[in-house]
Image (cartoon, helix red, strand yellow):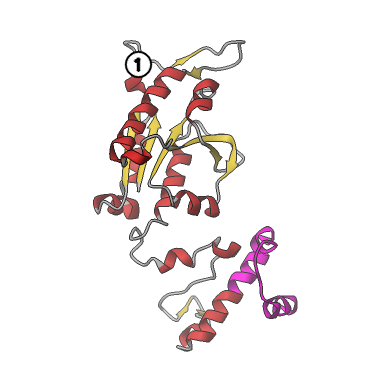
Amino acid sequence: MNFYILTLFPEMVSSGLHTSIIGRAVSRELLSIRTINIRDYAFNRHQSVDDYPYGGGAGMLMQAEPVYLAYEAAAEEIRSRRPEAEMEKKPRVVYLSPQGKTFSQRMAEELAEEEDLIFLCGHYEGIDERVLEEIVTDQVSIGDYVLTGGELPAMVMVDTISRLVPGVLHNDISAESESFQENLLEYPQYSRPEVWHGKRVPEVLLSGHHANIQKWKRQQSILRTRERRPDLLEQCSLTEEERAWLKKS
């Protein structure tokens, strides 16, 4: 999978996304993460990409042309790898914005189906609306708060999506059992020693009985979701047996 990140701070993104699991996946060529510096497409010797907004207002606004030229550089690279029949297909462009749809695991799963993704990181008071209308396909927020720029949200999204790409995680089963799969939070987990600070590992996990262990994990996920994220439980498909058990628990 190929990620293109249009940013004013490429070193921030590169240093954060070339370590740990994601960094190893890049070195194994399972992922490609390319940063494009929007300043490289400025049309003045100071590499300034911002200006005052028409109509007044606080702060500066990123200009349309440098953003568009940075986008075109990424789009041209994408087109060069596509078969002729798909040359006209517009790349998926995600603009990180507090006004966008809230990012979720379900959205990550959908975006992970793409071969190429472009992320546009804004700064200052935002980006000239005209270029957003021309190139952006998705506006996405990672939460109801405001950050200084789009780099951290882009990194969050790239990390989340990358984990769903086959081969990125050594054990692909782990991606299927993590929090938010089936709208349930992940069950509690334990490692050695069996007793730590007087607290024992639940006996069922030491039993070796696979069916009982799986049932316990499922029940613990349900209980934890009810306790910590009851809003998710409303969207979860529980069996009649599980619903009856939950009422008694």
Could you say which is closer to the camera, residue 241 or residue 17?
Answer: 241
Q: Amino acid at mark 1?
A: Gln
From this view, report whether residue 206 is shown above or below residue 172. below
Circle 1 is placed at which residue position?
47
Residue 80 spot, x, y in % from top left: 28, 36
Is 230 magenta? The answer is yes
Residue 131 spot, x, y in % from top left: 49, 23
Is 206 magenta? The answer is no
In the shown orientation, is residue 246 left or right of residue 56? right
From this view, report whether residue 164 is shown above or below residue 40. below
- The residue positioned 30% from the left and 34% from the top of the image is 77
- The residue positioned 55% from the left and 22% from the top of the image is 129
**Label 1: few (<14), some (14–19) or many (≥20) C-alpha neighbours in 10 Å:** few
* Residue 28 found in image quarter: bottom left
Residue 154 spot, x, y in % from top left: 45, 40
From this view, report whether residue 242 is shown above or below residue 108. below
Q: Quadrant of the C terminus?
A: bottom right
- Answer yes or no: is residue 8 visible: no
Per the image, label 1 sits on a secondary structure element best described as loop
- The residue positioned 46% from the left and 86% from the top of the image is 206
- The residue positioned 45% from the left and 33% from the top of the image is 120
Q: Residue furthest front?
A: 85
Residue 40 spot, x, y in % from top left: 32, 22
- Read off the magenta span: 220-249
